[in-house]
Image (spheres, rainbow, N blue to C red):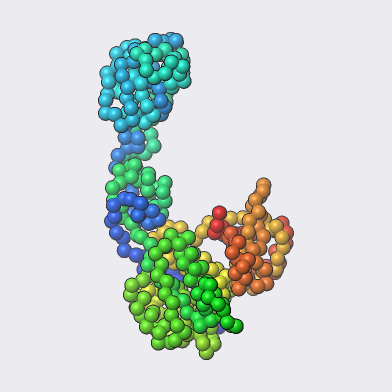
Amino acid sequence: MKQQPQDAITVEEHRARLLGLVKPLPARTLPVGPALHGAVLASDVYAGHPLPLWENSAMDGFAVRSADTASTPAQLEVIGEVPAGSSWDPALLPGQCVKIMTGAPLPTAADAVVRIEDTSAASTGWDVSTVQVNVPVPAGKDVRASGEDRSAGELIAREGEELTAARLSALVAAGSAELAVRTAPRVAVLVTGAELRPPGEELARGQIPETNSLLISGLLAESGITAATIVHCVDDLQAVREKLEELAPAHDAILSTGGVGPGDYDVMRKVLVDQPGVYATRVLVRPGQPQCAGRLAGGAMIFALPGNPVSAAVSFELFVRPVLRAMQGHTQLQRPRLQAIAAVGWKAAGNRLQVLPIVFEHGDQLRCAPAVAASRISHSVGGFGSAQGYALVPAGIEQIHPGDRVEVLRTAP
């Protein structure tokens, strides 16, 4: 492990160095289906046919020749019905029409649709052989034109875009049956710490519940990575070394928390010192100043995060999440930044970027307030439980006052 010079680096410098180590995951061509939700497109996708495929009705009503409705009321003969999915294309003579349902193909001989509420059928019902049209309709009325949404061959989605429910639905509608995608990275969470005990276990003096595996696996799940491997390991140099050697070839990234300080019992630091592709540095941020990351000889990237829960979560948001998204080929690596108004004042971090967990207050403007005390962020896991995002206060600012405009990242609804 390489030790960087004592001068701390900025968040942007550390993140850029990590992104420079990213190897994009290989693309796979997979059939469309629910399993593709959250995957990222590995190539641009174009419409295989026009949307809509053919002219169709935008309303339940009657497909008519608009000229037959020029003088109203007009009595028209109903010669049949075209439901959605029907292939029937009836020939309409002057004075004739057909019942038609929303989405059904418009007969070639028709050029407009009269809504049912604008006919006598609104009161007499559908079962009629003649219908009175009460309003004139122009050509094209309540007709969806073929290709009005997208033309055949038109770009539907770009490489690097995530397959959301809406986007995947649109691609299937446009004719896609399989897609070139990058699925989620394979991530392992390695838990060490002699003081950590499973939830519910009786605690002796000096012991605490182990929560970071839940925290990190939850942050992964919220980032679309639901199949993380959770591994617990004793605080033993050889055991940790062997576990990393086992996990590295089978995963794209390994995340650990704690054990990277200068102390005699910080096993992760001692194990990683033998890894030339891993480096330790100090970052100008609060919380999360000590950072240790890089690429293991076994292939996986490793993020040895600080052990304090909020420090670990902040480090995940600033560094881990963008790297995992870059692996998957996302175009947008970081969350959008918003502007909020400080509802209360707090002390900033001065010479470092302050990343402060916040809750939002809604009104005519988006307002925010600290979820934890600004002076003791890193370990305040209780208050962190209510956080909905982070305030980003740049280095050089000593104090935030009520009413100040603050840049924020929103991480929860």
Residue appearing at x 38%, y 34% in the figure = 148
Residue appearing at x 36%, y 31% in the figure = 103
Residue appearing at x 67%, y 68% in the figure = 373
When the figure is inspected, residue 363 is found, relative to residue 229, above or below; the finding is above
When the figure is inspected, residue 164 is found, relative to residue 263, above or below; the finding is above
Classify the position of the N terminus by image quarter.
Answer: bottom left
Left or right: 364 as drawn, with respect to 229: right
* Horizontal and vertical percent position of residue 65: 35, 17
When the figure is inspected, residue 257 is found, relative to residue 385, above or below; the finding is below
Left or right: 233 as drawn, with respect to 92: right
* Horizontal and vertical percent position of residue 147: 35, 35
Q: Quadrant of residue 207?
A: bottom right
Q: Which residue occupies the extreme bottom position in the image? A: 264
* Horizontal and vertical percent position of residue 290: 54, 78
Residue appearing at x 39%, y 13% in the figure = 131
Q: Quadrant of residue 357?
A: bottom right
Left or right: 391 as drawn, with respect to 212: right
* Horizontal and vertical percent position of residue 252: 37, 70
Report whether residue 83 is seen. Answer: yes
Q: Quadrant of residue 221?
A: bottom left
Q: How many marks?
A: 0
Q: Nearer the viewer, residue 412 or 343?
A: 412
Report whether residue 293 is seen. Answer: no
Left or right: 287 as drawn, with respect to 343: left
When the figure is inspected, residue 134 is found, relative to residue 411, above or below; the finding is above
Classify the position of the C terminus by image quarter.
Answer: bottom right
